Image: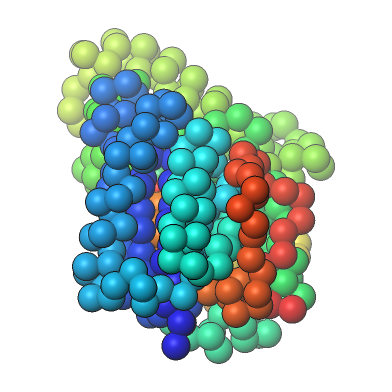
Amino acid sequence: MSLILGIESSCDETACAIVKDGFEVLSSAVASQIAIHAKLGGVVPELAAREHLKALDPVVSQALDQAGVSASDIDCVAVTQGPGLIPALLVGLSYAKGLASNLNVPLVGVNHFMAHIYGAFLDGTAEELTDPAGYPLLALVVSGGHTSLVLVSEDGTARQLGCTIDDAAGEALDKGSKLLDLGYPGGPIISKVAENGDPEAYNFPRPLTGGAGKPLAPEHRYNFSFSGIKTALLYHTQRLGGVKNIKDSLLYDTVASYQMAVVDTLTRKTMLAAKDFNVKQIVLAGGVACNKLLRQLITEKAPKGVKVRIAPPKYCTDNAAMVAGIGFHSFIRNEFISHDADSFARLPGIVKVPFLG
Ligand code: KG4
Ligand code: ZN
């Protein structure tokens, strides 16, 4: 039996979790900085780093307490190395180095994207994770900072097929909400408000889908672009007399249509890649995977015979259970990192997942 302690600090959540043998989550503590960044309308990296520093000791104690284990029971520390905000990542990585050396256990570095994908397999079994019938696997990793389509092959190589060329989908929801004076973070607010509106009321653009009479450029086949949707929303609100003057019913329709444009674009691109690469499984991951409409459309539109896996919301937003979970596989393969390992901001071209091949 192996107990892995995971640490996550890539963005604005400080998290620690204890996971047994890669799948059984004994505890998952998350300290969110949302309230702090909300006042500023977005995440400020240096501020996030300082908050991580304050929150790490308490979340680690909380995770150990909730799991009912003591630090000396831990077999390995797993930490998010990247991609993410460098100042934020560095705090978690340095802390994890110190903790691993204090406990005299090895340290493994975790790729945040692969951890998000792994989140969909937590509380499951090794058979489900490694079943060859589930590969190639296509993951839509969609959060406040990222929007990527990642293809994981049976040999364990993962490569990014495409990503956003400007804003992330979560950012489009967050900024859309800000523009409409609805608050931060926009994702959950938009999905709540949208429930009262008609998603077909207004036709916001579906960028890079080959709509609007513009053929889809081959280099953007799997890429996304969400900054135009935001601008369309701005002009739309101006046409309706400005944010302060929109009638409630029109506001609800606006939000529902805006959400639909983002979600429909994500779904169309995912299905395009799923068919092109003849994938056997689609995983929806990252904070925006909490979105009900997205969960519904990805499930409905998946090609026949393709499995869809979506993590419960607590493993979609940033958490450390996914870090400790995937970290277990690096641990049993003796894939450790040294104490001079660095954080990284972007997803490397090709990544090897530690649970296949
Ligand atoms: O993965 P995550 O916790 O952090 C990043 O790495 O960014 O994702 C946060 C993002 C935010 O943009 C937030 O608005 C979005 O996930 N989000 C949602 C929902 N809950 C969180 N987006 C849409 N619908 C939701 N229910
Ligand atoms: Zn994330």
Query: Is 86 located above or below residue 32 in the figure?
Result: above
Using the rendered view, name the quadrant where residue 55 is placed. top left
Q: Quadrant of the N terminus?
A: bottom left
Tell me where residue 152 appears, x and y as whole percent.
69, 66
Please state the total of marks drawn on the protein image. Answer: 0
Residue in view at x 25 percent, y 51 percent: 58
Nearer the observer, 140 or 121? 121
Using the rendered view, name the quadrant where residue 137 is placed. bottom right
Query: Is 63 located above or below residue 9 in the figure?
Result: below
Q: Is residue 275 left or right of residue 329?
A: right
Q: Is residue 7 visible?
A: yes
Q: Residue furthest left?
A: 248
Query: Is 231 located above or below residue 133 in the figure?
Result: above
Tell me where residue 80 appears, x and y as whole percent.
52, 53
Query: Is 91 located above or below residue 182 in the figure?
Result: below
Nearer the observer, 40 or 211? 40
Residue in view at x 29 percent, y 10 percent: 241
Tell me where residue 312 appears, x and y as whole percent.
35, 66
Q: Quadrant of the C terminus?
A: bottom right
Q: Is residue 305 visible?
A: no
Q: Residue furthest right?
A: 218
Residue in view at x 76 percent, y 50 percent: 349
Tell me where residue 123 appears, x and y as whole percent.
39, 78
Give the colour scheme of this rendering: rainbow
Q: Is residue 236 left or right of residue 183?
A: right
Q: Is residue 249 left or right of residue 256?
A: left
Nearer the observer, 149 or 349? 349
Residue in view at x 72 percent, y 31 percent: 214
